[in-house]
Image (spheres, rainbow, N blue to C red):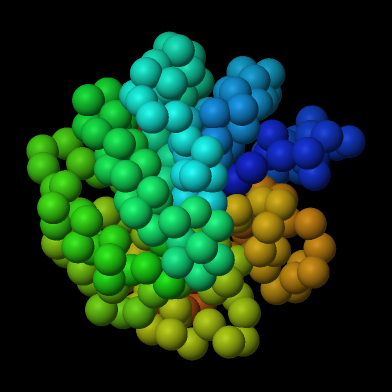
Amino acid sequence: MIDSHAHVHDRAFDADRAATIQRARDAGVVGIVTIGCDLEDSERAIAAARAFGIVASVGIHPHEAKSAPENVAAAFAPLLESPEVVAIGETGLDFHYDHSPHDVQERVLRAQIGVARERDLPLVFHVRDAHDRMLEILREERGAGMRGVVHCFTGTADHARAYVETFGLCLGVGGVLTFKTATDLRAAVKAVGIEPLLLETDAPYLAPVPMRGERNEPAFVTYTAEQLAQTLGMAPSTVAEVTTRNAARFGFTR
């Protein structure tokens, strides 16, 4: 399996980062993408990827959009010289917490879409309570070369179909799928099937059942894979095979 979205460079792993990554490998995780959320965080992600033989993304999270440089492309340029970088993001819209004004989130999102298109890199989208607006922006920004994944997808079945069928995006499925309250998410997953899905953890956040309440880590992706297999009525080996193929297509492994 590949954990297509984690933050193993996060301070939460400072005491046992090497052991955490080894546990993931022991659990069958053959690739991890450690995701940058601002310029400094992206630098840490690249350093961790370099140290542990994994890959990283460079991005400005919508929460951090208010502090983004005016010229995002120029700020990203030196980071994108690193061979560990395989994606742009996470970027997107978060209208739940509103840590950054909506218009600023949108400006920074569009700038990162532009960088991804110019560099021929996939995008990692964060979308919370903003799916309708995100779909509008994607319609405006769609063009040759835009590809990527909506990470930690928690929208409706209609949103899922729109991302997949209209824009050819993949959906990242994480620990939320294992929650008892995730009825709508399970319906969305069934609506699109296994082919556009990726596995993720968002570690150290959103640990799956039965580890809920604990610090999440990439090894726990196995619990989500088991739930996804149960939800779709297929063998766990098929879930692992298809999601790994999708992640590898984005260059999410070495």
Which quadrant of the view contains residue 95? Answer: bottom left
In the displayed structure, would residue 67 be above or below residue 173? above
Q: Does residue 143 show up?
A: yes
Where residue 183 sits in the image (x, y, percent)? Answer: 48, 87
Where residue 195 sits in the image (x, y, percent)? Answer: 30, 60
Where residue 159 sits in the image (x, y, percent)? Answer: 28, 73
In the displayed structure, would residue 118 be above or below residue 122? above
Q: Does residue 122 show up?
A: no
Q: Residue furthest left?
A: 144
Where residue 224 sits in the image (x, y, percent)? Answer: 58, 65
Along the line of sight, which residue is nearer the eye, 131 or 220?
Answer: 131
Residue 251 lies left or right of residue 30; in this view the side is: left
Residue 21 lies left or right of residue 89; in this view the side is: right
Residue at 73% across, 56% down: 216
Residue at 19% across, 62% down: 136
Which quadrant of the view contains residue 47? Answer: top right
In the displayed structure, would residue 228 be above or below residue 66? below
Residue at 51% across, 70% down: 96
Along the line of sight, which residue is nearer the eye, 94 or 101?
Answer: 101
Q: Residue furthest right?
A: 15
